[in-house]
Amino acid sequence: NRGGGILNSAKKLNETSETDLYEQSKKRLDDVIAQGTGAVEIKSGYGLTVEGELKMLRVIKKLKENYTIPIKATFLGAHAFPTEFKNNHSAYIDLIINEMLPKIAAENLADYIDAFLETGYFSVTETERIIEAGKKYGLRPKIHVNQFTAINGIKMCVEHNALSVDHLEVVTDDDIEALQNSNIMPVALPSCSYFISIPYTPARKIIDAGLPLALA
């Protein structure tokens, strides 16, 4: 509400050097390891420019090289639309597909691809375009979905054999049914709900439906 959020973080990220970003990330990684974490997924998604996204992914690659803990890198260029693309979504998606992905693949910088599939962010159709482009480079989707609204995104994720659907603060009976017919891992992010004061993932409903549930 005070002007924070993804675009604010992206502005700071793009002003931070790769060296500084590595040093900051190293401290955070040391902290999560000390807390008993056994494996880590790190997402990009706070650059929203070709160079910003590559910078984040290069830092993740360096962390992978310097730590023994398993680290997976997820490319989340489709996290929000930068201000200059607010009224031209397809141009930003073209930038992700035609410029970011080939460079990421050339440097082997990512294991997975993600998108913020949500009302006001990336639609089901837009996310599908990104998933299909990522698959051509061997990037399996892990999708940020159903955080605020349910717009049939989970059904599409099932059709594209996503590895996981993450957030799920809002879950419909249709979503549960789609997940029951898949091998997708549902993932809840309770600390996210806590910090931004939104409902928690209906974990009991998911478990009672016979589904697994991961916490992140």
Image: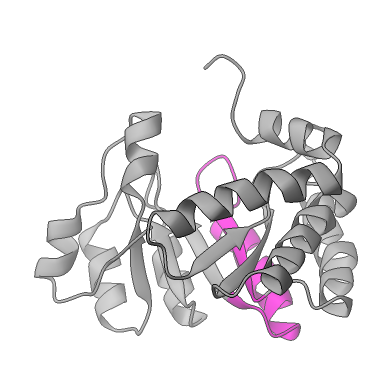
Q: Would residue 118 be found to the left or right of residue 192 on screen?
A: right
Q: Residue furthest left?
A: 208
Q: Residue furthest top?
A: 2
User: How is the rendered protein coloured?
Assistant: one colour
The residue lying toward the viewer, choosing from 28 and 162, is 28
The residue lying toward the viewer, choosing from 70 and 3, is 70
Residue at image location 81% in from the left, 66% down from the top: 97
122 in magenta: yes
| Image coordinates for residue 200, horizontal then vertical, percent | 26, 43
Residue at image location 51% in from the left, 65% down from the top: 40
Please report the bounds of the magenta region as a residue range: 111-140
63 in magenta: no
Note whether residue 47 is visible: no
Residue at image location 71% in from the left, 62% down from the top: 60
The residue lying toward the viewer, choosing from 148 and 113, is 113
Decide: is 141 above or below 147: below
| Image coordinates for residue 83, horizontal then vertical, percent | 78, 32
**Where, by quadrant of the figure, is residue 208 drawn?**
bottom left
Decide: is 93 above or below 178: above
Decide: is 213 above or below 45: below
| Image coordinates for residue 164, horizontal then vertical, percent | 43, 71
| Image coordinates for residue 98, horizontal then vertical, percent | 88, 67
Which part of the image, by quadrant, shows the C terminus?
Answer: bottom left
Note whether residue 82 is visible: yes
